């Protein structure tokens, strides 16, 4: 017999026995929001009659067609959006006659969102609401719903509401399902708790399980299967050294079994290069495994609007971090050398988007990436990377047409007379780039980021970060006249008419030397190699 069904039948049997002693109607309430199956794509309040009664739903009941981001138990769930306190809720518009425990299954919408919610009760037909239990913080999606349970113990007419509370991001969303209220007078075993909650860990965990119900026996599994009375009995702490899903429930004589608790202890797998993320993508959607990037990469673009987007690359590949729900807190700047990011990998148009668990660790700042010179024909091999394209022609330039926000433009170069690749002004910035509303040039050397990370884009596109990227003056030492730059052996000579900030970078972007020049002749002693030298706002590439 299915264990879950057996437990609900046990609750019902106890409720029937109590009818003789309780003047109120005693029936365990269970609602999975599957019947009726109603599709709604707006968060406007609506009254829906489900199997248990009439509910007011200020949330999305079902996407049509279903979205990958919506998590369901059965055919449906309710999506709540944490915009402002009280703006999104799910509440009963009918009374239950008495309540013992109330519990609900929950999970984040998508795998990179989350939020907080609380359960409230009303004993005056919805006139006023009071909080019960504690506020629940919803972790990033781990592949399974979690359960929250709280004791009510009220012998009278009562109704309940689930409300999203204020969060760090206005886009936080959650899915809730399988709402259950046991009868007053039916004692339910308290759901087990874990000393290590669902989350990502980098050290082994000693997990202690407990139930506040005296004499309760806790059964658990660590292989992902549903626990039963035939499963392992908890007696000593569990030593967890690898990613493990712990499923538990508790039983006690004369009481209703607890609801199941699920804890996922995740240990990130290490990746040393960004190229490895391209091999970690699932066939579709998101790979829920966590990975920790242990290499070193440089940020090439960083945008912060309604969501955070960070492009970064090392010497193997480029990747974009997509933080739609602002899970990270530290703003990364162009030139930051970063490492230590823990993230899950989502596949969008065969390109990885990283959904972060933590912030980058910044190793150094002010680093420079010297973009390789490529052609439009090379673009498909440079996803999420910063590149230079010389003599790029804007086909729509006519001397008066201007760049508009979030708009595509036809382009070509010597390698491709016509191409499906477009130049596009980015839409994810706090403000429009400084070249928006300026006249489109006819032909330029440009520095651009290559992107293929939008579901709306069937192919690659390129975009410039700022106006300077659209008028590239980077040249080699052979024809650089400014500052009378010259070399002899491993010495670089130059002249300045005023003190200038001088920075030297290796070909990989690592800062090598930083000085302030003197008026007149200056020199720099370096080792043999390739360097990028920036004097003021001018840059030269030097081979010694």
Image (spheres, rainbow, N blue to C red):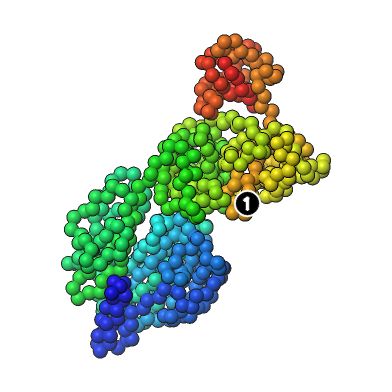
Q: Nearer the viewer, residue 240 or 226?
A: 226
Q: Nearer the viewer, residue 467 or 291?
A: 291
Residue drawn at (71%, 39%) of the image: 416
Residue drawn at (67%, 15%) of the image: 484
**Quarter of the image containing the N terminus?**
bottom left
**Residue 185 in picture, x, y percent from top left:** 26, 79
Residue drawn at (52%, 48%) of the image: 353
Q: Is residue 429 visible?
A: no
> In this picture, is 518 found above or below 3?
above
Q: Left or right: where does residue 155 sit relative to residue 336?
A: left
**Quarter of the image containing the C terminus?**
top right
Q: Quadrant of residue 249?
A: bottom left
> In this picture, is 237 found above or below 184?
above
Q: Is residue 202 visible?
A: yes
Q: Which residue is mark 1?
A: 458
**Residue 127 in picture, x, y percent from top left:** 45, 78
């Amino acid at each position: 017999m299915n264990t879950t069904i057996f437990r609900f039948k046990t609750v019902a049997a106890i409720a029937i026995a109590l009818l003789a002693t309780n003047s109120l109607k005693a029936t365990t309430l269970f609602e999975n929001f599957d019947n009726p199956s109603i599709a709604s794509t707006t968060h406007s309040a609506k009254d829906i009659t489900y199997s248990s009664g009439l509910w007011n739903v200020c949330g999305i009941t079902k996407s049509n067609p279903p979205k990958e981001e919506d998590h369901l138990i059965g055919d449906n769930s309710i999506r709540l959006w944490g915009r402002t306190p009280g703006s999104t809720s799910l509440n009963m518009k009918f009374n239950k006659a008495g309540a013992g425990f109330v519990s609900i299954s929950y999970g984040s919408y998508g795998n990179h969102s989350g939020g907080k919610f609380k359960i409230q009760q009303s004993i005056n037909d919805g006139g006023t609401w009071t909080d019960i239990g504690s506020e629940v913080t919803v972790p990033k999606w781990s592949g399974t719903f979690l359960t929250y349970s709280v004791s009510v113990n009220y012998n009278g007419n009562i109704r309940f509401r689930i409300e999203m509370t204020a969060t760090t991001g206005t886009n936080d969303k959650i899915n809730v399902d399988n709402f259950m209220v046991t009868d007053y007078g039916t004692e339910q075993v308290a759901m087990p708790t874990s000393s290590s909650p669902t989350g990502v860990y980098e050290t082994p965990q000693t997990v202690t399980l407990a139930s506040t119900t005296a004499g309760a026996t806790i059964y658990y599994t660590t292989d992902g299967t549903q626990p039963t009375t035939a499963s392992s009995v908890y007696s000593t702490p569990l030593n967890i050294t690898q990613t493990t899903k712990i499923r538990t429930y508790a039983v006690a004589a004369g009481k209703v079994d607890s609801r199941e608790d699920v804890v996922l202890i995740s240990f990130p797998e290490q990746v040393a290069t960004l190229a490895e993320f391209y091999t970690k993508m699932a066939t579709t959607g998101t790979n829920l495994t966590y990975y920790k990037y242990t290499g070193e990469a440089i940020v090439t673009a960083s945008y912060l609007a309604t969501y955070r987007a960070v492009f970064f690359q090392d010497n193997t590949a480029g990747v974009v971090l997509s933080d739609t729900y602002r899970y990270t807190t530290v703003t990364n700047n162009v030139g930051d050398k970063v490492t230590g990011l823990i993230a899950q990998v989502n596949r969008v148009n065969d390109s990885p988007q990283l959904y972060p668990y933590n912030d980058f660790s910044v190793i150094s700042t002010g680093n420079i990436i010297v973009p390789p010179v490529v052609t439009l024909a090379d673009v498909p091999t440079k996803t999420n990377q910063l590149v230079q394209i010389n003599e790029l022609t804007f086909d729509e330039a006519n001397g008066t047409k201007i760049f508009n926000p979030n708009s595509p433009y036809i382009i070509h170069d010597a390698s491709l007379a016509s191409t499906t690749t477009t130049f596009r002004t980015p839409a994810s910035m706090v403000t429009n780039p400084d070249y928006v509303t300026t006249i489109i040039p006819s032909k330029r050397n440009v520095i651009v980021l290559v992107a293929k990370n939008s579901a709306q884009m069937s192919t690659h596109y390129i975009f410039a970060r700022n106006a300077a990227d659209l008028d590239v003056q980077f040249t080699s030492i052979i024809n650089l006249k400014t500052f009378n730059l010259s070399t002899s052996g491993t010495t670089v000579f130059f002249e300045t008419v005023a003190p200038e900030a001088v920075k030297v970078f290796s070909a990989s972007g690592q800062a090598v030397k930083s000085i302030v020049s003197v008026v007149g002749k200056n020199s720099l002693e370096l080792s043999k190699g390739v360097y990028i030298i920036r004097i003021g706002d001018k840059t030269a590439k030097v081979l010694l």
